Image (tube, rainbow, N blue to C red):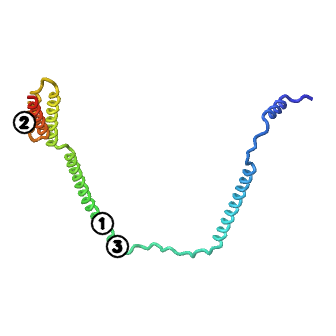
Amino acid sequence: MKADPIDELLRRADLAAGEPPVPDDLAGRVRRKARRRRLAAISAGAGVTVLLAAAVAVALWPPRPQTSRPTAQAPSAASHEEVLRLRAEITALRAEADSRAAVLNQVVARLRQQQDHLADLQRQLDRPDPLEQVRRQIDRTAYIMVYQADHSRGELGFVDSPEQTYRRVIELFPDSRWANVARERIAEMQSGKGDTL
C-alpha cells in the first residue's frame, strides 16, 4: 500500500525540524504553577469559610429592639415664635455679612491701588538717573579727547595739536580725572621740549 503524499511530507517536515526545544527550568516552572494553584484554592476556601461564618453570625445575632419614631406634632405657638426669632436672626446675620463683605472689598481695592503705586515707584527707580547719564557722557567725551590727543601725539608733525586738545579738555572738564591726565601729558610734553633744547 502506498503512503499518502501529505503524510510523507509531514513526516519529512517533522524530521527536518527536529525535537522541540525544552526550557531549562521546566520542572521548576511546573512546581511554581502547581503551588500558585494550591494557594488560590486555599484562599478561595478560606474566603468561603469566612463568608459563611459572617452569615451565620448575622443570622444568630439578636435583633435590635424597635424604637418608635416620634410622631410629628402640630406646631405650637412657642415653636412658631422660635421660627420667627430664627428668621430675624438670619436676616441680621445676612446684613452683617454684607456690610463686612463691603468693607473687605474696599480694603482689597485700596491694597490694589497701593500695589499699583508701588509698581510705578519701582519703575521710576529702575530708570537710570539723567544726571548720572550726563556725567558719564561728559567723562566719556573727555576720555575720547585725551585719547585722540595721545594718538595724534605719536604722529610726526602734530606736536602743537595734542597740546591744544589737552588744554581744551582742561578748559571744558576741569574737575574730571581726564583733566588731570591732560595736565600730566602737557607737563610731559613741556619737559620733553626742554630736554631737546
Q: How crowded is mark 1: few (under 14 residues within 10 Å), some or many (20 or more)?
A: few
Q: Which disc, if any, is residue 93?
A: 1
Expressed as whole percent of the image width and height from the top left, the position of residue 5 reads 84, 28
Q: Name the residue under label 2.
A: 171
Q: Residue at x 79, y 36 (%)?
A: 18
Expressed as whole percent of the image width and height from the top left, the position of residue 14 reads 80, 34
| Outermost residue toward the top in this view | 157
Q: Which disc, if any, is residue 169?
A: none
Question: Given contact means CB atoms under 8 Å apart, are the residues at marks 2 and 3 in contact?
Answer: no
Q: Name the residue under label 3.
A: 82
Amino acid, disc 3: Glu
Amino acid, disc 1: Leu
Upstream in sequence: badge 2 or badge 3: 3
Q: Is mark 2 on a helix, strand or loop?
A: helix
**Which of label 1 and label 2 is nearer to you?**
2
Upstream in sequence: badge 1 or badge 2: 1
Instruction: State the image quarter where residue 10 is shown.
Output: top right
